[in-house]
Image (cartoon, rainbow, N blue to C red):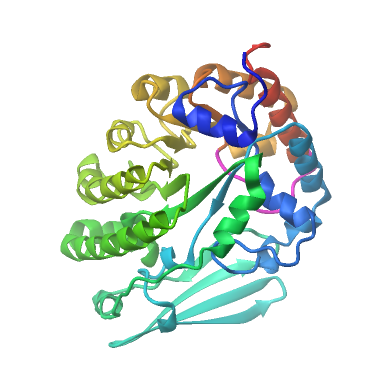
Amino acid sequence: MIDNLTSNERILKTVKGERIDRIPVMPFDTFEILQLRNGSEDLMFATGEHLNEFTNGWKRKDPLYGEVVQYAVESGCDIIHRTSFTELDRRFFLIPEDHLRIRDKKIRDEIIHREYTIHTPMGELTYIEELKKDMSTTWVRKPLLENKDDVEKVLSVPYELRKSDMKSFFKTRDDLGNKGVICCFVSTPLVCISHMFDFNTFLLWVVEERKIIKTLVETVYERIYSQLEYLLENSVGPLVEFGGSEQATPPMMSPELYDEFVIPYDGKLMDLVHSYNCFVRVHCHGKIRATLPKLLKMGVDILNPVEGPPSGDIELNEAKEITRGHITLEGNIQFSELELASEERIDKLVKRAILDGGKERFILTATEWPITYLSERQKRNYIQFIKSGVEYGSFDRV
């Protein structure tokens, strides 16, 4: 056993396959919550946007959440803090901001509709999302693209590389220090395109309008590559996380379509990240058994959440065999278990995950993070998750 490491050291050594004191344990993004608990009035994400108090304010107010955060801090939990940049917004084809207008409409006290209007040389496009009070997620009420005319409109907007304001990113990275590792989130080309459509329409067009989808994917790939290269040239890192094109995994799309629409583009983006000595993290829910060898070949360094059945189709020990020590696996306690299970069951699930994940290249985390107030059961289960993870993570007690 080696001396106690900082969270930053523990995570990076895990990704490199080096010896560690214990496996990293991540209940959720503790650093963000600590900032909230400290009452920061100027909390800024790397997007440059203020925290949306309407949707995320519950994090400040929930005493049960606060208890879990305090326990996580006292227990030395680890942090991979995800950030993003508006220039890489997956919803709008990376169009320049001066083509975009945003307007909020109050539907009820607890619901807001946020309407985005894109001005194009061929007419306007509209995207509407719904925000609910104290719910850290959104719902699409009107997709950006609904027909071929809409596609022509979005393609007509001239693109130019936008130089991101890096100050917020570096301040966050400095504030995080040795408490964890910062991670820049980037949606992959197919994910960007799928988010502009109703998802059923997108899947239909992949088959029936393949040429249009291919044009959109190739166009947004070039834009993502340019923006990402600019960030990397300006020392963004050490982790870059890609939304792992889970829309292209079974049963939504076939392995052949994955090979056509994902590998040629995602692979080059991952090569770009590696060329700057940074690490590739991929987030991909669902059934990944058929996809895992492809991710391995593309050079993925970290994969989450590696869901077991029934949500996924592969167990951790099987994933370890396939990846052969070349990918750090992150996972894989189901969020539903944290909502509904007993503390005894959480303890068993964590112990099993740690044994299957092994001493090397494994990070213990849940498959999702909470989006609203915790129940008393969730609070107890999160605390048990942390307690068991730290206790078994050194492999002295398993």
| Residue 364 in view | no
Residue located 67% across and 36% down the image: 338
On screen, residue 67 versus residue 357, left or right, reads right
The image quadrant that residue 287 belongs to is top left
Above or below: residue 344 compared with residue 231: above
Q: Position of residue 239 (x, y in %)?
A: 47, 44
Count of numbered circles on the image: 0
Above or below: residue 154 compared with residue 219: below
Q: Position of residue 291 (x, y in %)?
A: 31, 36
* Region in magenta: 367-376
Closest to the observer, 303 or 230: 230
Q: Is residue 323 magenta?
A: no
Above or below: residue 362 compared with residue 263: above
On screen, residue 38 versus residue 354, left or right, reads right
Residue located 24% across and 65% down the image: 219
Q: Position of residue 153 (x, y in %)?
A: 28, 80
Q: Is residue 368 magenta?
A: yes
Closest to the observer, 269 or 53: 269
On screen, residue 116 versus residue 26, left or right, reads left
Label the magenta part by its dominant secondary structure: loop
The image quadrant that residue 68 belongs to is top right
Residue located 79% across and 60% down the image: 39
Residue located 35% across and 69% down the image: 93
Q: Quadrant of the C terminus?
A: top right
Closest to the observer, 127 or 232: 232
Q: Quadrant of the N terminus?
A: top right
